Image (tube, rainbow, N blue to C red):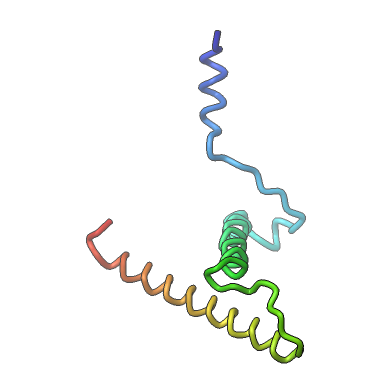
Amino acid sequence: MVDEKARTGVAALDGCYVIKSDVPRDKAHRETLHARYKDLAFVERDFRDMKTARLEVRPVYVRKRDRTRGHVFVVMLALLLKRYMERLLHASMEKTDLQ
């Protein structure tokens, strides 16, 4: 037997979450905190992309420090290019009637 009133109350909170921060209210608005929290998803996706076959910043068996740094530098450039292309694509899609 399901309590429909309780179920409706719980369903009203679907998709809601609470962000707890130690930043004082006068230093950042809740919209800013929410936006920074959502940015974490992009950072996590970028790290996942760097580690997987997309950009492959996995253990690279090179002996010299400069070569390792060079590899990571190239991967970071690729990530920057990927983000730039995503922004261009997003901007071009907003200007069309496809939505």
- Residue at 68% across / 78% down in the picture? 60
Measured as percent of width and height from the top left, residue 72 is found at 65, 81
Instruction: Check the picture and name the quadrant holding the C terminus.
Output: bottom left
Residue at the outermost left position? 97
Residue at the outermost top position? 1
Measured as percent of width and height from the top left, residue 71 is found at 64, 84
Compare residues 55 and 4 and report the one nearer the observer: 55
- Residue at 54% across / 12% down in the picture? 2
Instruction: Check the picture and name the quadrant holding the N terminus.
Output: top right
- Residue at 54% across / 76% down in the picture? 79
Is residue 15 depicted above or below 11 in this figure?
below
Measured as percent of width and height from the top left, residue 22 is found at 77, 55
Measured as percent of width and height from the top left, residue 47 is found at 62, 66
The quadrant in which residue 58 appears is bottom right
Compare residues 28 and 7 and report the one nearer the observer: 7
Is residue 9 depicted above or below 65 in this figure?
above
- Residue at 62% across / 67% down in the picture? 51
Number of marks: 0
Compare residues 43 and 50 and report the one nearer the observer: 50
Is residue 86 depicted above or below 75 in this figure?
above
Compare residues 35 and 59 and report the one nearer the observer: 59
The quadrant in which residue 38 appears is bottom right
